[in-house]
Image (spheres, helix red, strand yellow):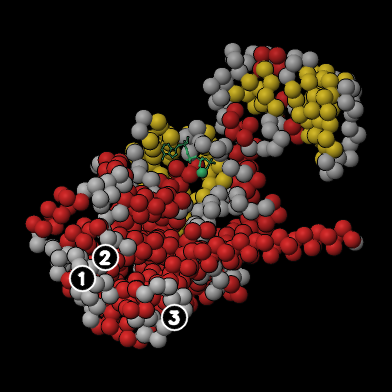
Amino acid sequence: MATVSLQGLKKSFGKTDVIHDVEIDIADGEFIVIVGPSGCGKSTLLRMVAGLETVSAGEVRIGDRQVNDVEPMDRDIAMVFQNYALYPHMSVFDNMAYGLKIAKVPRSEIEARVAVAAKLLQLEPYLQRRPRELSGGQRQRVAMGRAIVRKPAVFLFDEPLSNLDAKLRVQMRLEIKQLQRDLGVTSLYVTHDQVEAMTLADRMIVMNGGVADQIGAPLEVYANPATAFVAGFIGSPPTNFLDASTFAPGAPQGAQLGIRPEHVVLSGDGTGHRAKVLYAEPLGAESLIYARLESGDNITIRQDGALPTPAEGETVSVAWDKDEEMQFAKDGRRI
Amino acid sequence: MAERHGMVERRGVGLWLTHLGLIVGVAFIFFPIWLAFVASTVSQPEIVSPPMPLWPGDQFVENYSKALVSGVNAPVARMLLNSAIMAFGISLGKIAISLLSAFAIVYFRFPGRRLFFWLIFLTLMLPVEVRIVPTYEVAANFGMLNSYSGLIFPLIASATATFLFRQFFMTVPDELAEAARVDGARPMQFFIDILLPMSRTNIAALFVILFIYGWNQYLWPLLITTDPEMNTIVMGIKQMFPSGDDIADWPVIMATSILAMIPPVVVVIGMQKLFIRGLVDSEK
Ligand SMILES: Nc1ncnc2c1ncn2[C@@H]1O[C@H](COP(=O)(O)OP(=O)(O)OP(=O)(O)O)[C@@H](O)[C@H]1O
Ligand SMILES: [Mg+2]
C-alpha cells in the first residue's frame, strides 16, 4: 500500500507532446479514475506510472521513492490490461503464479496466495483450464487474480471492462469496486466510460488532449466542471451550450453558457425562451426532449417521466434557474 | 422423395469416381517406389534379365544386411547416421538461430535493426548453390572438410525461418510482453517461458520442413566430403553407381534407396499432428 504522486509529468513521442504537465497526489488506498475521450493520453499516463513508457519530464513517485528509472517489476505495481494479456499456453493457476515464480516465492506460499485469490474471484473450478477455455468475464477475473496475488502497492487498470458485454460490465464494475475496498490498494483506473468513472472513483482525472482538465470527486466534478470540455464530457445527455451574448448579457466576448439538461424545465405559464420541439424520447423514468431555441441553439431538456411530453413540432417555452448557469470563457475555462 | 433418392445416388457415384481418381493417382506415384522395393528383394541376375520382376523375391534379408553392414563404398548404416546428424544439426540449428534472431529483430530496438533485417532478408536470394564456391573456400580454410561441422554450419543460417518467426512474433500482442515485464520476466525469461511455448506448433512444422531439407542435401555433401566414411546417404546412392565398366549392384542400391526414404517419412508421420496444426492455425 502506498501513495502515488505525479509531479509535472510530461510525455512526448518524438516531436508530438502527448501528456502536458499532469500533477496529482494520490492518497494511500484511494481509487483514482482517469477518464477522457479516445486518444487523450489516458493509457500513456497509466503506462508511465507502470514503467512501460519512459517519462519525458517530471517525476513519478510511488511511496516515498522516485521511480522514473525503475523497472516495472521493481515498482511494486500490478497491471490489468484491456485484452487481459493472459499467457495462452498456461493454465489459470500458472498465469496467476508466473510473477511469483519469477520472484522465487516458495511453492507453498504461491499455492496459498493463488488459492486465496481464486476463492475471492470464484475461479476455483477453473484453475487447471487454459484461458481460451474461459468466458470473457472469467478471463477478466484471471487477469485480476494475477494482479492480486502479487500483493502490489498499486493496481493499474487500463480499460479492463471494455471487452465485456454491457450486463457483465456492470457486474464486474461492482466486483472491482468491492475488491478494491476490501484490499485497500491504491488504484489507478483508465476508462472512457463516464458511468464507470462516476461510480468507481474516489477522485477522477478528466483528461482532454493530454491535459488534466479537472481533478476531483465525481459529484464535485459533475456539479462544478472546471472547463467547458468537462461540462460536455461528464454527464449524459451532455450539457447544453448556448451563446452567452444572447442569454447572459454582460458576459465576455465569445463566452458560452452551459446548462445541464435536468436544470431546464418546460414552463407551463409561457415565461422563458420559446423553442420548437424537434423530437422527444420518453424513457420511462425520465423523458428527454430535444428542442431548438429561437436563437438557433439546440437544447436538451430532461424531465420526470411522469410529466406530459410535448409533441414534435409543438412550440414550448423553456426556462432555467440563473443559479444553475455556468459560464465558460472563449478558451473553455470556467468564469 | 424420388428426387432426393437421385441426389444421393449421384453423390454416391461422384464419391466412387473421386476415390477411383485418388487410387489411380496414388498407384501411379507409388509404382516406382514399389519397383525399387521389389528390386531390393531379388538377386542381381533376376534384375538384369528381362522381364523385370513385379513381385518381391526372397533376398530381402541378404540385400538389406549387405547394404547396412558393408554397402558399396561405405556401410549404409554409417551413411544413415551421417545424414541423421546432418539433418538434425541443420534443422535444430536453423530453428535455434532463427528464433533468436527473430526475437532480437522484433523485440529489441538496437541501432542498425532495420539494416540487419534487410541483410538477412537479402540472403534469401543467395541459396547454397549460388555461394557454393566461396563457402567451400571458407570451409576448407577452417579445416572443416570431411567433418560434421563442415556439413552443418555452412547451411545453418536461415533467412526463411527467421522471416517466418518474425511474422509470427509480430502477431503476438504487445500486451503479452508488457504483462510479462510487469510480472518481472527478463527478456530471455519471456522468450523461454512464453514465446517458445507459443511457437511450438510453428517450430514443429518448420522442423519437419527443415529436416527434409537437410536430409535431401546433395550438392554440398558431395563437395565437402571425400572420405566415404563421411558420405551422407543421398549423395552416397549416387556414389554407388559404377564408374566405367564395373557392374552395378542394383539390389543393394535399391535397398539403400528404400532405407534413405524411411527417416523423412518417420519424421513426417511422427510430427503429423503438430505439423498440420502449425500449418493450419496459429494458436494465440
Ligand atoms: N508509441 C507511440 N508513438 C507515437 N505516438 C503515440 C504512441 N503511443 C501513443 N501515441 C499517441 O499518444 C496519444 C495518446 O495515446 P493513448 O494511447 O494514451 O490514448 P488513450 O487516451 O489511451 O486512448 P484510447 O481511449 O483510445 O485507448 C495518441 O494520440 C496516440 O496517437
Ligand atoms: Mg488507451
| Frontmost residue, A215 versus B174 | B174
Same chain check for tags 1 and 2: yes
Q: Are marks 3 and 1 on the same chain?
A: yes
- Among numbered discs 3 and 1, the one appearing first in the sequence: 3
- Separation (CA) of disc 3 from disc 2: 24 Å
Image quadrant containing the C terminus of chain A: top right
* Residue underneath mark 1: B246
Which kind of residue does numbered mark 2 sit on? Lys
Mark 1 and mark 2 residues within 8 Å of each other at the beta carbon: no
The quadrant in which residue A142 appears is: bottom right
Can you tell which of label 1 and label 2 is closer to the viewer? Answer: 1
* Residue A249 in which image quadrant: top right
Task: Say which mark, if any, is on residue B85.
Answer: none
Kind of residue sitting beneath label 3: Pro
Give the answer, above or below, for where B217 lies relative to B60: above
Q: Which residue is mark 2?
A: B238
Neighbour tally class for label 3: few under 14, some 14-19, many 20 plus, Cα within 10 Å: some
Q: Which mark is residue B56?
A: 3
Amino acid marked by disc 1? Asp
N-terminal of the two: label 3 or label 2? 3
How far apart marks 3 and 1 lie (CA) works out to 26 Å
Rendered position, A97 above or below A161: below
Q: Nearer the viewer, mark 3 or mark 1?
A: 1
Dot 2: element: helix
Q: Is residue B234 left or right of residue B172?
A: left
